Amino acid sequence: MRALKVLILEDSPFQMMAIHQMLNACGVFDVLTAESVDAARQSLENRGPVDIAICDLQMEGPGGLELIGHLSESGQARAVVILSSAEASVLDHAVQFARQKGLWVLAALSKPASCSVLHQLLMTFVDNILPLEPALPVAEVRELVNTGDLSEYRLQDLLQQWVPYYQPQVGLEGGLLSAQAQVRWQHPELGLLSASSFMPLVEFAGLSEPLTWHLLDHALALSARIRAFEGRALSVMVDVLPVMHEQDDFYLRVHERIARCSLPAGILVLQGGGGRASSNASTVRAARRAAQGYRIATPMTADEFTEWYLEHENIQIPAN
């Protein structure tokens, strides 16, 4: 395995030692350790950026979320592993927060971690994330993109360029739990841009809502496509602006779309504002993910996702 550099944020000496030993067993020896966010920042300043940060969420004082925010702003980590005893909703929120900040999330795991799972995550990083070019900074994209390109007048062209990607969430035993809808911008001049590079520009242009509906429609279509192969629909997750949850007809429009695809109401999980298309079903799925732990595979297009799904005969979609 290529020599990786990993930071561990953990305030329990026993847990810290266990994770450190597992990393060594996986062939990773360049390990930074920190018992607090301040210590982690200082270590990064002294020894430079890392490939992966393993973050606990529940600590005395500032915790993993604050470090994730710092890593995003400073560019001092390519990916994170969230390892915590926190509740399912807290884990899901942390994953969403890190992803919105432009960080790769390799997994959200309940303590304790196992050496075999950690090795899988390290291999996922080496095989799928390490070869990728880092995301362009927003400031650079802002200078290169013509502001006139992001307008309602060009919305139909933009919807063709905004390509949905799907990130599978796979249980540690191999079962497919759900897929998170994401977006890339296939810019005609700049190439494929990650969401962290352009979403602030989309929000400033007032185009976040049409982009959200675009993703939601495509996610439901993927769920229906998987049902055609499996006989059961795939749970899909879509990030939604908090302001959209407050709209009087928002949930009516969501359920109309679900019904149009002949899908069960609980198949869609809406993230970003506390609202859910079906809170009971979503809570059950979140609890199942927290109980099992899950790793997050590389995002892929709908066609790639379907091909990947069909190639993995051991994948079993949990019943709703």
Image (cartoon, rainbow, N blue to C red):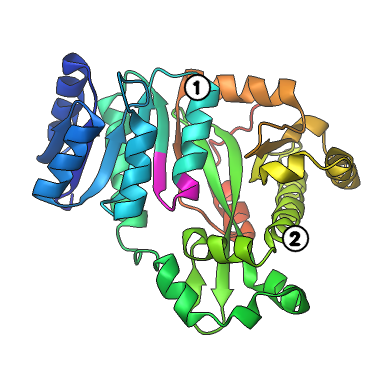
Q: Name the residue: 74% across, 35% down.
A: 267
Q: Name the residue: 39% across, 64% down.
A: 135
Residue beneath label 1, please?
290
Residue 150: percent from left, percent from top: 65, 75
Residue 318 appears in the picture as rendered? yes
Say which of marks 1 and 2 sits in front: 2
Seen in the image, is 206 located left or right of residue 26? right
Tell me the tag on residue 298. Answer: none
Residue beneath label 2, please?
210
Q: Which quadrant would the C terminus be assigned to in this image?
A: top right
Residue 9: percent from left, percent from top: 24, 30
Residue 275: image quadrant is top right
Alpha carbons under labels 1 and 2: distance apart: 32 Å
Residue 84: percent from left, percent from top: 37, 23
Residue 28 appears in the picture as rendered? no
Q: What residue type is labelled 1?
A: Ala
Q: Which amino acid does label 2 sit on?
A: Pro
* Residue 105 located within the stretch drawn in magenta: yes
- What SS does tag 1 mark? helix
Q: Name the residue: 28% across, 52% down.
A: 126
